[in-house]
Image: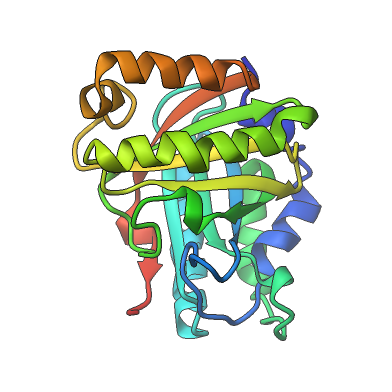
Amino acid sequence: MKSLQCFCAPVVRASLAAFLTVTAASTLWAQEDQGPAMISAILIDVKSDSVAEFEAAAADFSAAQEAAGRPFVHVYQRIRGDNLPGFVVFTLDGAYNGLPQLQPDPSIGNRIGNAVNSVSVVTVAAYGELGIDSGNMAPGGEFLTTRVRITSPSNQQAYFDWHENEFTPALREGGVTDLRVGRVIAGGNTNTFLRWSYSDTFPASGGPNVAEAVGQREFQRLLEGEANLIVASEDYILRFREELSFTAEQ
C-alpha cells in the first residue's frame, strides 16, 4: 500500500513557505453547487525532542490566522503509523481565490522549521456533492479517520461518478450523517481521493460501520466496485488538537 508520504515530497523550505503564506478569505469546507473548496493539507513530521516547541509555534500560527480573519485552522496529531510524532494541519488554500496574501510572521516560521524534520503540502479540492452535511467546517468529533484511495488516471472520473452516484447515496440512506470527500489537485498524485469521517471515541473499526448502515450484501457490492477502480489505499486515524486550532463562527 502507498502512504501519504509517497505522494507528498518532503521539501521543508518550500513547504514551510506554503504553510505560512496564506490569504484572507471566508468559505466552507465544501459548497454544493458552488464548486469545490480548496483546502491545504499540511503533513508535518516533528523531531522527537521538539514536540512541545512545535505545538507552541502551531498554537501561535493558529492565533495569528484567527486574528487575520481566516475561517479555520485545524490541527490533528497522527496517533498510529510511521514517522511519529506527526501532525496534519488543514486550512484554506488561499492561492486559489486570488485574494491578497497575508504576511507571515518569520519568527513562527523559524520556530516551526527548527522543530520539524519535514513538511509536505498538498492542495485538496473538497467536493460538496460527494459529501454528507459537509458544509460545516467544525470538526465533528475528537477523532478523524482519513481514507486514502488512489485510482489509475483512466479511472479518476469513474471513481468520482461511483462515489457520487453509488457510495455516498448508500451511506446517506444508511444513516451516515457526516462525510467529507476531496481529491488532491496539486502537490501530489492528482488521482488521489480522500474521505474524512469523525467520531467521538477511538474508531476501532476505522470509521463509520458502513456494513451495518447499508447492509452486508450492499456493502460487499460497494467494496467490489471500489476495488475495481483503485490501485492503492491506506487509512489513517488522527486526533483533533482543539487547543492548537480554531473555527471561526459561521
Asked if one can make out residue 50 in the rendered structure from this viewpoint, the answer is no
Q: In the displayed structure, does residue 144 sit left or right of residue 193?
A: left
Q: Residue at x 51, y 37 (%)?
A: 163
Asked whether, in this view, residue 227 is left or right of residue 180, the answer is: right
Vertical comparison of 231 with 250: above or below? above
Q: Position of residue 219 (x, y in %)?
A: 35, 19
Residue 52 placement (x, y as % from top left) = 43, 49
Colouring style: rainbow
Q: Quadrant of the N terminus?
A: top right
Q: Please identify the quarter of the rendering in which residue 236 is found.
A: top left
Image quadrant occupied by the C terminus:
bottom left
Can residue 112 be seen? Answer: yes
State whether residue 18 is above or below residue 104. above
User: From the viewer's perspective, is 36 left or right of 199?
Assistant: right
Residue nearest the viewer, comparing 87 with 181: 181
Question: Could you tell me how many numbered marks the image carries?
Answer: 0
Give the camera-side residue of 11 and 181: 181
Image position, residue 56 (x, y; %): 44, 59
Q: What is the x, y in percent for residue 39?
A: 59, 59
Q: Relative to 64, does residue 79 appear above or below in the rendering?
A: above
Residue at image position (59%, 43%) is 44
Of residues 92 and 65, which is closer to you in this image? 92
Relative to 83, residue 160 above or below: below
> For the point 65% across and 50% down, which residue is it?
114
Q: Is residue 49 left or right of residue 174?
A: right
As rendered, which of 173 and 128 lies closer to the eye?
A: 173
Residue 200 quadrant: top left
